[in-house]
Image (cartoon, rainbow, N blue to C red):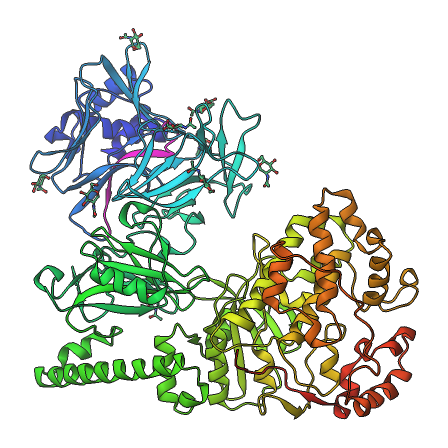
Amino acid sequence: MSKLSSTLLKPPLARRKTARKKKQTHSKMAFLSSPSLLSLPFLLLLLIFQPHISAQISPGSTLLATDLNTTWNSPNRTFSFGFLPNNENPSSFLASISYSRVPIWKAGTVDLGGTLQFQSNGNLRLLNGSGFIIWQSGTENLGITTATLDDSGNFALKNGSSVTLWDTFNNPTDTILQNQNFSSGKTLRSGIYSFHLTMSGNLTLTWNESIIYWNQGLNSSFNSNRNLSSPILTLQSTGILTIFDLSLPNPVNVVYSSDYSDNGDFIRFLRLDSDGNLRVYSSFRGSGIAIDRWSAVLDQCRVFGWCGNMGICRYNDTDPVCGCLSENFEASDPNDSRKGCRRKQEIANCPNSATMLQMEHTQFLTYFPELSNEPYSGGITACRTNCLSGASCVASTVLADGTGQCYSKLGNFVSGYQSPSLPSTSFVKVCGPALAYQPPSNSSQTQKNSSKLNARVIAIVVIATVLGLILVEVGLWCGLCRKNSKFGGLSSQYALLEYASGAPVQFSFKDLQRSTKGFGEKLGAGGFGTVYRGVLANRTVVAVKQLEGIEQGEKQFRMEVATISSTHHLNLVRLIGFCSEGRHRLLVYEFMKNGSLDNFLFSTGSSEKLDWDTQFNIALGTARGITYLHEECRDCIVHCDIKPENILLDENFNAKVSDFGLAKLVNPKDHRYRSLTTVRGTRGYLAPEWLANLPITSKSDVYSYGMVLLEIVSGRRNFDVSEETGRKKFSLWAYEEFDRGNIGNIVDNRLAEQEVDVEQLYRAIQVSFWCIQEQPSQRPSMGKVVQMLEGIVVIEKPPAPKTMEGSLTGISTSVSAISTFVGSAPAPSSSSSPLALDSFSVSRRNIEKASSTSTWNG
Ligand SMILES: *[C@@H]1O[C@H](CO)[C@@H](O)[C@H](O)[C@H]1NC(C)=O
Ligand SMILES: *[C@@H]1O[C@H](CO)[C@@H](O)[C@H](O)[C@H]1NC(C)=O
Ligand SMILES: *[C@@H]1O[C@H](CO)[C@@H](O)[C@H](O)[C@H]1NC(C)=O
Ligand SMILES: *[C@@H]1O[C@H](CO)[C@@H](O)[C@H](O)[C@H]1NC(C)=O
Ligand SMILES: *[C@@H]1O[C@H](CO)[C@@H](O)[C@H](O)[C@H]1NC(C)=O
Ligand SMILES: *[C@@H]1O[C@H](CO)[C@@H](O)[C@H](O)[C@H]1NC(C)=O
Ligand SMILES: *[C@@H]1O[C@H](CO)[C@@H](O)[C@H](O)[C@H]1NC(C)=O
Ligand SMILES: *[C@@H]1O[C@H](CO)[C@@H](O)[C@H](O)[C@H]1NC(C)=O
Ligand SMILES: *[C@@H]1O[C@H](CO)[C@@H](O)[C@H](O)[C@H]1NC(C)=O
């Protein structure tokens, strides 16, 4: 037939094909299947009386799921409306508008007998094989006389005067095409997930219309709580998501796809996928596939409910995978891990033996309060016991991010996430003893095991769990009595402790090599080694520090790592994990977006300068972090290397002290006096007692902090020597100026251009002079420093810091050794103080010095 018609009529390609479809659609006449002459006049008729047949569909037309080749097409065939096969289920078909077989609007899914009907009363509907209405437009009896699919992808139902009464652009399903307007009040849906544009211009992703798990507002220059007049979201064909609104002076670009501004024969669309993530896609004509160019939720495990109720999201090497919490649970649907899990024994049938299963590095997603109560600060024990005794509580999560906040889950839906990088511990109520999680082993083998073997395995698991719990208790008890040495010996105990105390994750060297792209992206180099950027499997960006000069054995190293990682505070950089393999010793830290303080303090470009408020907050945050190290954490730590390079800034410019606890790693042997073969402290920030063979205490950190504080105020390195300071050591010169009341000379010129809280500034200067007192006993404790900065306590005028020469006792030998060296140093002012040594390495062999970290009582 097609041969006949094409040779006889030679109609344009597009028209011919559509005309054929039209015929079949209209009549389902038997004769069409055979090359009959009857078809010829019919075809002619169609061509004569319906010149725009390819674009228009008349009432009474029907598409069949059995005939995938018959579709309603846009004039230049860019888009077509019809049935698409379902790859996963060969007996189901998707009625949709598609671009090269990529669906961009979906009516619904039906079986082989399904039909899509444009009824003569103007209603468009989708029926399944048993004649049930799966979906309909609900537009009957509105005077609709025609339907069109245009080249922008919009399918419209129109009345006699070509007024659109219903169209797919205004009734989106899960996708917005490029240039399609999506106004506030409309919804994209995919299963239980939905996407909205709020009146304030926020983009939100919502689970079950109750939990907002992603919320992106206009940028900070707009008030995100002010309502706009009628915001519209459009994906521009350039790949930029833009919000238009009458009350905005200009359209606001909110998202740029990774290929934005690329040109080519492709279309773009925004789709809410069935996994709850919102993505921008590009699809090339004819390719049949779409490539994602942006996704809203970077970490799929953060999509609420992705793994179903009681399901937990974890990453295998590469992908997020769903599973159950422990052997207390079983999959709701063994064939679909996303369907969640259920308790093997329900809590309701468990009157008195409910216990809390504890999961480290686990969070029950804590988005909005509907399914959980207000978080409260309670700590780990209260978080567990309160939930156990609360009748409506099913699970709880305590954050170890420094807030110690506890969230109790009240509803019946709990969505979990477990990852080495999560600083939280979770509890879930189970019936009977808490069992361990068994990672899925090679399933086929497991299933082949005889029941005898299974019984044995269960027995071993039970015994191991009980033993494990006992050991964990012992480990925790030891931890509480602060005797490191008591549980230091056994690596098996360590392994359990690691599991129990929020301890760090062990990475293999290969893992880290891969996540840092072969140690390719260097972030910096410090006293302890080089730092590289890395990305873990769950897309967490991390800083990987390759330690150098570690003299410790494996056991000792792990002990120190455990101490460091159990130290959590908002103003301390968090240790995520470590690697100890052969000679490799690496530490994995959270990544700080804004780098270290020195970049901002001593940069010459004024754009990189921070304002005073931010600087003061950094100073205060740093002081709080060090206070925590000195006074509040379990194994008190003297940092020994406080300097601007070790004060990192997160994306909100919060200070995070890094490198704490490392000094001990490098100089492990004795906690107090030793001959140092490697001095890691940094000139300019080292307290006098370092050089004087006197005990190092927390006051040494106070000295270094004082120097940093002075630098924050002045914007200058404390050891820089200049004409301006009369070639004196900066701190001494600064005190003289302060003493004469010339504060303006000390303060960074760049602060002069801003509004500065002068009283606060004055406080900071006074505190810095108190901290750099030569006699450790004269320096305040770090806790006192915080109070002084906050203005809680009255600050007396600090005395002169003095030079150390000759004033400390018992230092003559080392000082003379240093002086010999200093004599040949170029900087003239150096002679006033050994602290101004240009290079420690040269003199280090001569100095008997205190160790860099010490543990002390109280
Ligand atoms: C059609 O849909 C109805 C209602 O959803 C369902 O009960 C029926 O089994 C479906 N028929 C077929 C053939 O899928
Ligand atoms: C079809 O029409 C649309 C809109 O006019 C245009 O962007 C597209 O390039 C056309 N496609 C072809 C193959 O002509
Ligand atoms: C089409 O709809 C518009 C708006 O509802 C109406 O004004 C117009 O009269 C209708 N035309 C016909 C022919 O029904
Ligand atoms: C989208 O909205 C803009 C502004 O309101 C309007 O100019 C444009 O025609 C609309 N586009 C479509 C496809 O409706
Ligand atoms: C979604 O919310 C409805 C009503 O709020 C509730 O009945 C339903 O159980 C929820 N769905 C799930 C999966 O929790
Ligand atoms: C809009 O989103 C921002 C985050 O980008 C959020 O802080 C703000 O509260 C949101 N506003 C509303 C009204 O949800
Ligand atoms: C903004 O609009 C929403 C929805 O229309 C409304 O509930 C809310 O009260 C409005 N907020 C303000 C500040 O006008
Ligand atoms: C916020 O958006 C506006 C308009 O797109 C832009 O001019 C401004 O630079 C943005 N501000 C920030 C802080 O990104
Ligand atoms: C991780 O899970 C994905 C999806 O289940 C699977 O395709 C992949 O092979 C898994 N990778 C490893 C290393 O197990």
**Residue 167 image offset from top left, x and y in percent:** 31, 24
Q: Quadrant of residue 183?
A: top left
Question: In the displayed structure, would residue 730 be above or below residue 306?
Answer: below
| The stretch drawn in magenta includes residue 165 | no
Question: In the displayed structure, would residue 438 be above or below residue 824?
Answer: above
Q: Is residue 544 left or right of residue 804?
A: left
Q: How many marks?
A: 0
Residue at 29% across / 47% down in the picture?
274
Q: Is residue 410 left or right of residue 805?
A: left
> Which is more toward the observer, 265 or 616?
616
**Residue 729 image offset from top left, x and y in percent:** 85, 69
| The stretch drawn in magenta includes residue 85 | yes
> Which is more toward the observer, 268 or 420?
420
Question: In the displayed structure, would residue 29 be above or below residue 618?
Answer: above
Quadrant that contains the N terminus:
top left
Residue 618: tell me if it is visible: no
Residue 381: tell me if it is visible: yes
**Residue 772 image offset from top left, x and y in percent:** 74, 69
Q: Which residues are magenta?
A: 74-87
> Which is more toward the observer, 776 or 816?
776
Residue at 29% across / 27% down in the picture?
8
Q: Quadrant of ligand 3?
A: top left
**Residue 105 image offset from top left, x and y in percent:** 31, 36
Residue at 17% across / 39% down in the picture?
65
Q: Quadrant of residue 155?
A: top left
> Which is more toward the observer, 219 or 253?
219
